[in-house]
Image: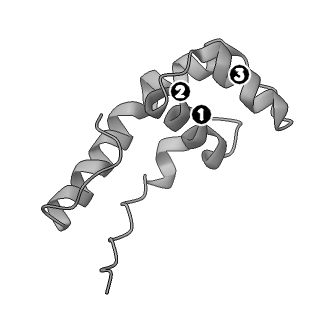
Amino acid sequence: MRTRRPRPATIPRSAFAGFPSPPEVIVLAVRWSLRFGLSYRDVEELLAERGIDVDHVTVYRWVQRFTPLLAEAGLVVQELAPGTPTPCRW
């Protein structure tokens, strides 16, 4: 029987204060950029295909701003479940 992985720690809602885009869009763009090594322009195109108009500079700023927070959230998961493989290393 498979064991359940603990849910990743969520980023505090206040971290997204002042950003006009929904937190889900920001996290998705940052994940695509980091996980798949996509350029900021590639992420811009992928979001545009989904009807989200974002400039590549905005994606760059999101990556700079939220990568430490997402990495910190990933470390919390590793501390809660030692030995659990992580699909992405920051």
- Alpha carbon distance from label 1 to label 2: 8 Å
- In percent of width and height, residue 37 lies at 47, 23
Judging from the image, what secondary structure is the residue with disc 2 in? Answer: helix
Residue 62's mark? 2
Tell whether label 2 touches label 1 (CB within 8 Å).
Answer: yes
Mark closest to the chain's N terminus, 1 or 2: 1
Model colouring: one colour
- Alpha carbon distance from label 2 to label 3: 12 Å
Judging from the image, what secondary structure is the residue with disc 1 in? Answer: helix
Q: Residues within 10 Å of mark 2 (few under 14, many from 20)?
A: some
- In percent of width and height, residue 62 lies at 53, 27
Tell whether label 3 touches label 2 (CB within 8 Å).
Answer: no
Residue 76's mark? none
Q: Going by the image, does 65 lie left or right of 49? A: left
Q: Going by the image, does 72 lie left or right of 19? A: left
Number of numbered discs overlaid on the protein picture? 3
Tell me: residue 82, above or below residue 39.
below
Q: Amino acid at mark 1?
A: Ala
Which residue corresponds to mark 1?
29
Q: Amino acid at mark 3?
A: Glu
Mark closest to the chain's N terminus, 2 or 3: 3
Q: Picture quarter containing residue 41?
A: top right
Which residue corresponds to mark 3?
44
Q: Nearer the viewer, residue 14 or 52?
A: 52
Mark closest to the chain's N terminus, 1 or 3: 1
Q: Nearer the viewer, mark 1 or mark 2?
A: 1
* Residue 17 in view in this figure: no
Tell me: residue 57, above or below residue 1.
above
Residue at position x 66%, y 18% in the image = 42
Q: Residues within 10 Å of mark 3 (few under 14, many from 20)?
A: many
Residue at position x 44%, y 27% in the image = 65
- In percent of width and height, residue 56 lies at 66, 15
